[in-house]
Amino acid sequence: MSTRHILLGLLARGPCHGYDLKRRHDERFPQARPLAYGQVYTTLQRLVRDGLAEVDGTGSDGGPERTLYRSTAAGTEELLAWAGGVTPPAPFVTNEIFAKVVCAILAPADPAAYLSAQRAAHMARMRELTAVKTAPGADLATVLSADYALNHLDADLRWMTTTAARLTLLTAEVDPA
């Protein structure tokens, strides 16, 4: 995920303080890792440095002084180019579950037990996400985020089922008897 572009997207709605950008991020991307305040402010400084955002004023409103940021025309242009670009499918398998299964097959481990435990963890997470998205008052961002995560978990589960069915063959390839 590109924090730079996410912040530009959040700034597209109008000028905002760093604190509010962090809060908006966490609301709009509820299943994503929350942004740290330091990451928000570091990214904002880079956006300003690169001419993609600018300071729109400062104020305290009775509290600590806050800087208001807004996107520039160049920032809007970059955001639109990024948002309209097709994200290429990952060219390599980099999933930790895949790596653990391969290593369990290669080592004197029990890949079937690992797959069973991982399946149980995935199913538990799917139940949690289903509860989150079907909760009364769940907003659209929460539902979309939960649906995205559920589909990825479902794909993992389908792969685990296929792999579990092939374990005898896979183990035999590694350790021919």
Image (tube, rainbow, N blue to C red):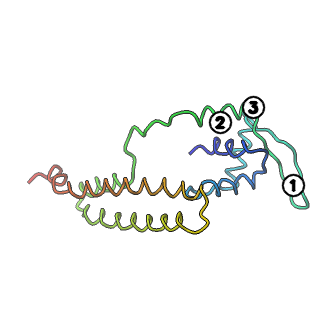
Residue in the foreground of this view, choosing between 35 and 87: 87
In which quadrant is the N terminus drawn? top right
- For the view shown, which residue lies furthest in the right direction? 62
Place of residue 120 in the rendered image (x, y in percent of width and height, measured from the top left):
36, 68
* Residue shown at 43% from the left, 64% from the top: 126
* Residue shown at 59% from the left, 37% from the top: 83
Disc 1 crowd rating (10 Å Cα; few below 14, some 14-19, many 20+) is few
Helix, strand or loop at label 2? It is helix
* Residue shown at 59% from the left, 35% from the top: 82
Place of residue 113 in the rendered image (x, y in percent of width and height, measured from the top left):
27, 66
> Quarter-wise, where is residue 144 in the image?
bottom right
Q: CA distance from mark 3 to mark 2?
A: 10 Å
Q: Which numbered disc, 1 or 3, marks the residue that appears first in the sequence?
A: 1
Q: Which one is in front in this view, the residue at disc 2 or the one at disc 1? A: 2
Helix, strand or loop at label 3? It is helix
Q: Which mark is residue 107?
A: none
Residue in the foreground of this view, choosing between 123 and 163: 123
Q: Which numbered disc, 2 or 1, marks the residue that appears first in the sequence?
A: 1
Place of residue 24 in the rendered image (x, y in percent of width and height, measured from the top left):
69, 54
Q: Which mark is residue 65?
A: 1
Measured along the vertical axis of the image, is residue 29 above or below residue 8?
below
Q: Which mark is residue 73?
A: 3
Left or right: 69, with 118 as reference point: right
Q: Which numbered disc, 3 or 2, marks the residue that appears first in the sequence?
A: 3
> Quarter-wise, where is residue 49 in the image?
top right
- Which residue position holds label 2? 79
- For the view shown, which residue lies furthest in the left direction? 177
Which amino acid, mark 2?
A: Leu
